[in-house]
Image (cartoon, helix red, strand yellow):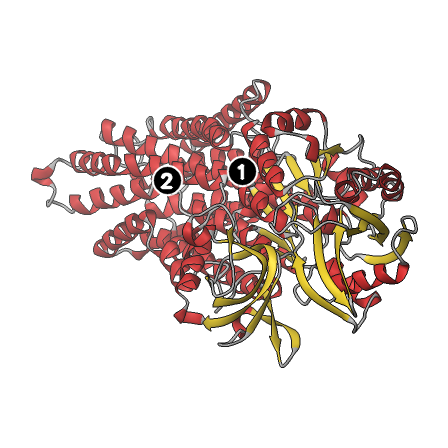
Amino acid sequence: MTQPTSRSISDILRENVFTLFNGILTGCFIAVLILGDLRDGFFYGVVVVNALIGIIGEVRAKLVLDRAALLAAPESRVKRDGAVETVALADVVLDDLLVLRPGDQIPADAVVVESNGLGLDESLLTGEADPVLKDEEDQLLSGSHVVSGTGYATVTAVGADSYASRLTSEIRKHSLVRSELRDATNRILVYLSWILGPLIVITLIGRVLTYGGFATLGQNGHWRRALLDAVAAVVGMIPEGLVLLTSLAFGVAAIQLAARKVLVQELAAVEVLARVDVLCLDKTGTLTSGELAFDRILPLGDAVPQQQAELALAAFGADDAGNATAGILSNHFRSAAVFVEHRIPFSSATKFSGVVFAAGDVRSSWLLGAPERLLEEHPDELAQATAVAATGKRTLALVRAIDPLPTGLHAPIRGVRVEPAQLVVFEESVRPAARATLGYFRTQAVRVVVMSGDNPVTVSAVARALDLDGEAVDASKLHGDAELAAALETSDIFGRVSPEQKRAAVGILREMGRTVAMTGDGVNDAMAIKDADLGIAMGTATAATKAVSRIVLLDNRFDRLPDVLGFGRRVIANVERVANLFLAKTVYGILLALVSAVMLWPFPFLPRQLTLVSTLAIGIPAFVLALAPNRRIYTPGVLRRILTYSIPTGTIAAAACVIAYFPLYRSIPLPEVRSITTITLFCVSLWILCVLTRPLSWPRIALLAGVVVAMLLVCVLPATRDFFMMHIPLSLELLWGIVAGVAGAAGIEVFYRFARRRELVFDRE
């Protein structure tokens, strides 16, 4: 079974075709068909093109993301014919023997045949937040995740026969990150949906009254002129393309990130990193390569013979379901003489694992784990381990238990006497680009918090190598959320952080009003990643971690995050820019419709003339600007800034058109008045666009010049002049229209400078 990472084709078609605005404009187009002059239906071509661009863009994004998702698809380990194999979840079949380790996702319904403290997170299925311990013969549900312990289970149901798989698929499919852009766009659409109905009614009544009222509507073609005016007025109110360009910006960013081996599991997640001001990182697998290599063993006294210690390490390594440490040990320590009787799997709570084995006639119990947990009663040996850890090496202590081992999965080691045997030292390389990446985030006002489960001394050593200031706080000594919150106020580096503390830290930071991103690769990171505003998983992360993340770094390169930040900033800044264009058009469309209805004027434009201005001064430039580079640092309040800019500028544009139209509409023919008013509107719209393209660069100057040249050609070439009915005589009336347009442009400039001084709007980049 495969899980979709994006919307279905039918969803894409439905959401791009069956919209409120498309419905209104379709009604207007039908009215044009009734009138019989298809030139005034030119606006509907924009609707069709918008829908096609949206569909093609989103389908392309879906195909790219679905292909990329195959690289991040979770896998399962199964034991077939005595050998352990790694297979895709979809390749698990009935009666397979699953090898279960922490972080694994249960790919199908199964029954436990062996459990070593096996604990599962079934929260996606049952809502139960606490891990559920599983013993032999217990049922496992597909979609749940192993959070502790190890074991084996036999598959009993796969695919459609597994009810849980359908449930988890739906949960994944409909989960959404909080997107300020999406929220702002939706609120704008809601506001418009409230007022469009009454406005359309007022417009229709105003058109009827303008042409003599209902009694004379059928005479001399009055109904045709009234209906044409109504269509023009309604077309001016609709911000067609606003939702399209938002989706297009998200989709293009996701495609470009996929080419950089970054899988965006939800398009709006691209935006979220641009809003992040706290980035929480795990050390292992994120700042470091995550690929441990055996370094050496160091004896701790002579109480335990070297040969017995190596047999113990072989026993820890001889575990099919063991973690990465067990896999490394299996490559260096092997013995056929070892018979394992019992295992205590590694737990994030205890920080150690245990094994009871027999070698010949000798039966012994051993523990392997954090030195500060296992060597508490042996200060000299603990000091030796701390000194090694201070060099940045990962250090584990191997001890032989004198007393019986605890049987509970989370039982503490206190009360069990042990004999120190060896220090097992591993080395882990810091990612080459980690220092530069962290430096970049510092320059971007993003706080970086390192939270690792490793020894604080080791974490401090890695932090120093990455130019991070301060010593690591030992989170195991912090009791309760209050102490953790106080530590987060003063420190950015933490060691011995439990999974519960990671999750609590994310919650505390969010309560402080921060936007939090969490990265990681281990199962101990999964719940914190799930709770963060933006979860980011490494490509080699456990299935549980990938399942709850929004972004997956497929090639495990932490240095990809600046790219994600850059694309997110581009999306936010550019969509805000083009939204100003569309909303300014909606504002002046509404105001002109109301003024002409109240004053009983013929509407100042034909539908095709409004379409001409909106295409040249809004549609084409918006398409270009939505995809242009933009690294403006995110500032909250997108909706407020859009309304603050678009309402005044739209009002100024409407006022300029009224000033141009009012003295002329009774003195010269209506087609000429409409042509002159179109020139006025174009001048003001051009300056709205000019302000939004700042700071100007040569490509943007070329864009503005191209718009002007296109308008001149429309007015000069006979074919386009006749098509758009741009009958413009060289006269004082034309000069009046140009003066009104220039005055409106000056008003736009004055408002923009005033708004910048009052910080009502900001520089665009």
Residue 173 image offset from top left, x and y in percent = 45, 55
Left or right: 46 as drawn, with respect to 755? left
Residue 35 image offset from top left, x and y in percent = 22, 53
- Going 36% across and 48% down the picture, which residue do you hit? 608
The part of the image, by quadrant, that contains residue 501 is top right
Amino acid beneath label 1: Arg
Residue 56 image offset from top left, x and y in percent = 48, 61
Q: Secondary structure at mark 1?
A: helix
Q: Secondary structure at mark 2?
A: helix
C-alpha span from label 2 to label 1: 17 Å
Q: Nearer the viewer, residue 294 or 231?
A: 294
Which disc is residue 53 wearing? Answer: none
- Going 22% across and 30% down the picture, which residue do you hit? 600
> Crowding near pointer 1: few (<14 within 10 Å), some, many (20+)?
many
Q: Which residue is mark 2?
A: 189
Residue 748 image offset from top left, x and y in percent = 51, 26
- Res. 488 visible in picture: yes
Amino acid beneath label 2: Leu
Left or right: 86 as drawn, with respect to 667? right
Q: Nearer the viewer, residue 336 or 501?
A: 336
Q: Nearer the viewer, residue 329 or 194?
A: 329
- Going 80% across and 51% down the picture, which residue do you hit? 399
Task: Look at the image and tell me in which quarter the C terminus lies.
Answer: top right
Q: Nearer the viewer, mark 2 or mark 1?
A: 2
Q: Which residue is mark 1?
A: 577
Left or right: 297 as drawn, with respect to 756? right
- Going 48% across and 60% down the picture, which residue do you hit? 143
The part of the image, by quadrant, that contains residue 415 is top right
- Res. 569 visible in picture: no
